[in-house]
Image (spheres, helix red, strand yellow):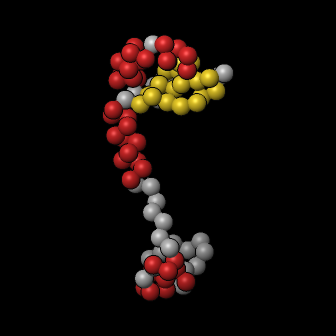
């Protein structure tokens, strides 16, 4: 992984136009306050990747909405045994 650019919140606020250009090559800039990460500044390409990752997160389905065939498979499954 490449070296992450870290800047203080004060420096980021004072030199925003500089960091607006630098984030394009850095991808991500960590913003810190009192030696603690408080946020990040993402390039457009990293923001697109973030949105794509969020789309692929697990979807929660209420048990009441699971069809009978899938529920039967769940109920008849055995712990530690791979499905066929």
Query: In this orientation, does residue 22 appear?
Result: no
Left or right, residue 78 beside residue 83: right
Residue 69: give x, y in percent of width and height.
43, 85
Residue 10: give x, y in percent of width and height.
55, 16
Query: In this orientation, does residue 23 appear?
Result: yes
The residue depicted at 41 percent of the width and 31 percent of the height is 42
Q: How many marks?
A: 0
The residue depicted at 49 percent of the width and 30 percent of the height is 40
Q: Nearer the viewer, residue 56 or 35?
A: 35
Examine the rendered structure and indicate whether residue 43 appears above or below residue 67.
above
Left or right, residue 44 beside residue 2: left
Where does the C terminus fall, quadrant-wise? bottom left
Residue 66: give x, y in percent of width and height.
45, 79
Residue 46: give x, y in percent of width and height.
38, 35
The extreme right residue here reads 34
The residue depicted at 55 percent of the width and 20 percent of the height is 9
Q: Nearer the viewer, residue 20 or 70?
A: 20
């Amino acid at each position: 992984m490449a070296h992450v650019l870290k800047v203080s919140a004060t420096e980021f606020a004072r030199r925003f136009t500089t960091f607006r250009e630098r984030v394009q090559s850095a991808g991500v800039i960590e913003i810190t306050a009192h030696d603690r990460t408080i946020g990040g500044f993402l390039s457009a390409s990293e923001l697109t990747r973030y949105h794509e990752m969020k789309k692929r997160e697990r979807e929660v389905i209420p048990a009441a909405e699971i069809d009978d065939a899938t529920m039967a498979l769940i109920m008849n499954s055995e712990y530690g045994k791979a499905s066929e």
